Amino acid sequence: MPLPITLIRSSLFALLLGWAALLPVRAESPAANPRQTWQMLDYIAVDYAGAVQGGRVVAPSEYAEMQEFAGAVRTQLASLPATPKQPALLAQADRLAVAVATKAEPAQVAALARGLADDLLADYPIGAVPTSPPEPTRATALYAQQCAACHGPSGRGDGPAAAGLDPPPIAFTDADRAAQRTPLALYEVISQGVPGTGMASFAGLPDADRWALAFYVGSLAYSPQARADGEALWRKNADAHGRIPTLEALTRTREADLATSLPATQANAIVAYLRSRPQAVNEPVAGAGPLALARQRLADSQHAYAAGDIAQATTLALSAYLDGVEPIEPTLAARNTALLRDIETAMARYRTQLGRRTAPADIAAQATKINALFDRAEAVLQDSHTDTTTAFLGSFTILVREGLEALLIVIGMIAFLRKAERREVLPYVHAGWAGALLAGAVTWAAATYLVDISGANREVTEGVSALFAAAVLLSVGIWMHQKSLAGRWQHYLHAKLSAALSRRSAVFLFVLAFVAVYREVFETILFYIAMWSEQASAAILAGLVAGSVVLAAVAFWMLRVSKRLPIGRFFSISSILIAVLAVILVGKGIAALQEAGWVSQALVQAPRIEWLGMYPSWQSLLAQVVVAIAAVVGFIVNTRSAPVPAHSPKTQARGIDQ
């Protein structure tokens, strides 16, 4: 049964290429190097104080390096792609170079360098943000292997190789220096190295390891007591949450800057805690409502928009929904589905307004509407009278809703192979869905004990896998429809399926089964993690069992019905069903990528029917229309190109019913 690999590949390529225009362009001009420019500015801001004091040069080699870096900053800025703000950046670079040349006070030079660095990031984003909260503890062994020889086992700069290095390696335990550095600065040094020193580039390490290492070395200057104090402060200090609202903000936060708005001891403790446990940035303030994080992100988004930072405002708005609302979605959906839909629509409209650069007054008015919906949602969530019932219904609904899509695809594949008498290929399909369940168990363990899977990453995974499955199903549906016409299925079975199935096609069946099932398992697991509570655990487990029974019954019924259908009719019905699934999945895929911020979103007055993949936006609806048209055109072409049967109607009917 050689599946139409060429057709599948062509359809997949066409679908992905067609939607590539909707994805943001993240490439950077090869000639531009804003990351290195930013790194040099950070280096000047931190190390100039060691070269000049009181208007006198105290370290000639260090001062020469500061002059060299100041000149290089000016040169690199001039070589970057032209933007409206580039002349202002060049003027700032000139002022910095003059300050260094005239041996200005360290505080003045640091302020000039940091101001220019911040403006550089705003005009030339370097895109260095961890995809998920780093795990500093995973870097312990890595530090011992790669860094301890120079920087010492405790980060004091006293490793066995330190004596032969000029300049000497940095002491990470230097509290004053640590207060001036950000995790982003440490990440850039680890990634690019420092020319003229013994610090080599570690760009060969995985990005997650470099971020973990950056947070680890950035925490070495802080005591265990400071981290413990910081944990207590972070859990109850709403002001601190407002100043470090996101993981991206944490990577760019200096203790010295935080100390300008908080007492120095509190700033020290909070930075100590967050650098040792970055995932805590997503934890709400203790005692706050279930939507506290969503409220905070929404408020921060308004502030960023008022300050003119549209990109940051959009990122925070996405986080408000993905990290603040989605975790409580299963429970709220079980209690008041209409309210949940109102919140989703209102927040989508808010993001659309940001993209259109609506007046701040209108942005504030929309945020007020969203907060009013949050008030209603928290009142619903705090009503404990229906906890058991809603937990059961939520658990049951989630499993059945997510499981049916995967079940339709997998059962369809199994029924097809049985009809085609290719049972020896079934192990590939069974291995695919079983492997997806195993991968789901690993995902559950990772999401529970190891890493915090962000909302954006979750939506990207779901969206990309849905588009892949939709492209494959569209091509398979058109192919099955072709084989259902005018006895073609008989010719196909006798002429093609009599030969051994190619290994490549069998592996493809495994991949399709794995992707189709893992997408649903991935989303289901994260929903269960979000809604789990000890009080309602029995009801949740009961819903899980009941949903599993329903899915098993549906699978049994589908397999039994498929056995009774004549193969020609089976092909015809399956082709239509698969095409419909492709339309549903492409709608869900685009919607997921919209929620992750990968695809723009233009709202339209249309119904929202999740089980059909229909969402009220032009992009998702247009994607479904395109796929539906492609399916219809494919079916029409198949019908018109079908040969006229040479058999009599009676013979033809007898052949089809065999």
Image (spheres, rainbow, N blue to C red):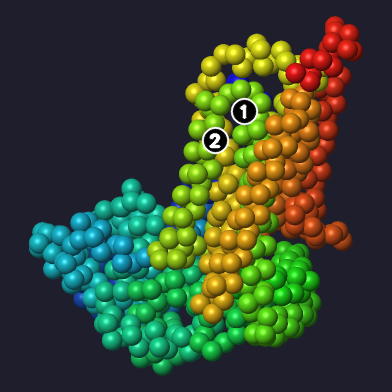
Residue under label 1: 417
- Residue 645 visible in rendering: no
Front residue of 574 and 424: 424
Q: Amino acid at mark 1?
A: Leu
Q: Residues within 10 Å of mark 2 (few under 14, many from 20)?
A: many
Placement of the C terminus among the 4 image quadrants: top right
Placement of the N terminus among the 4 image quadrants: top right
Residue at x 32% of width, y 58% of height:
190
Position of residue 300 in the picture relative to residue 100 (left or right): right
Q: Amino acid at mark 2?
A: Val
Residue at x 71% of width, y 75% of height:
335
Residue at x 35% of width, y 63% of height:
212
Location of residue 285 in the rendering, given as x and y in whole percent from the top left corner: 52, 85
Residue under label 2: 429
Front residue of 91 and 38: 38
Location of residue 481 in the rendering, given as x and y in whole percent from the top left corner: 77, 27
562 in relation to 516, above or below: above
